Amino acid sequence: MLAIDSEMGGYVTVSVKVGRDVVERARALGIDISELVRRVLEEEVSRRELTRKRLGELRDALSAVDVGRVVKHIRKDREGR
């Protein structure tokens, strides 16, 4: 379950249910859960935004490819073998 509550200052509180044993083990290891979740979420969002941008660039580049011409060259190459 993921719950999001609005707060002031442009931030929201994100609540997530995690097994008690995981939280206890993380605390025993000195893991700052809030900081870890914040950092990992920011990294994942950035990674996906970059992926989306790159896919758009590839889509633009591939739209310029003449498929008929590619097929013609492949057939010609196969016949030459």
Image (cartoon, rainbow, N blue to C red):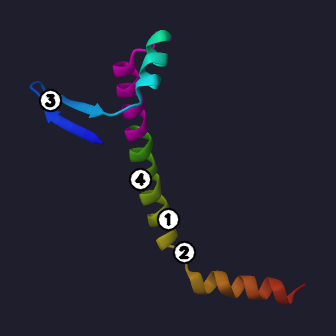
Label placed on residue 10: 3
Ranked by sequence position, the earlier of labels 2 and 3 is 3
Residue linked to disc 2: 65
**Residue 47 location in percent, x, y?**
44, 41
- Magenta stretch prevailing secondary structure: helix
Q: Residue at x 74, y 82 (%)?
A: 74
- Estimate the spatial distance between the alpha carbons at disc 3 and disc 4, rounded to whole Å: 24 Å
Labels 3, 1: front one = 3
Residue linked to disc 1: 61
Labels 4, 1: front one = 4
Labels 2, 3: front one = 3
Depth check, front residue: 7 or 68: 7
**Mark 3 secondary-structure assignment:** loop
Badge 1 amino acid? Ala
Question: Is the residue under label 1 in contact with that under label 4 (CB below 8 Å)?
Answer: no
Question: Is the residue under label 1 in contact with that under label 2 (CB below 8 Å)?
Answer: yes
Residue linked to disc 4: 52
- Which residues, given as a range, are shown in magenta? 29-45
- Estimate the spatial distance between the alpha carbons at disc 2 and disc 1, rounded to whole Å: 7 Å
Query: In the rendered image of this protein, does residue 4 appear above or below residue 80?
Result: above
Q: Residue at x 49, y 65 (%)?
A: 61
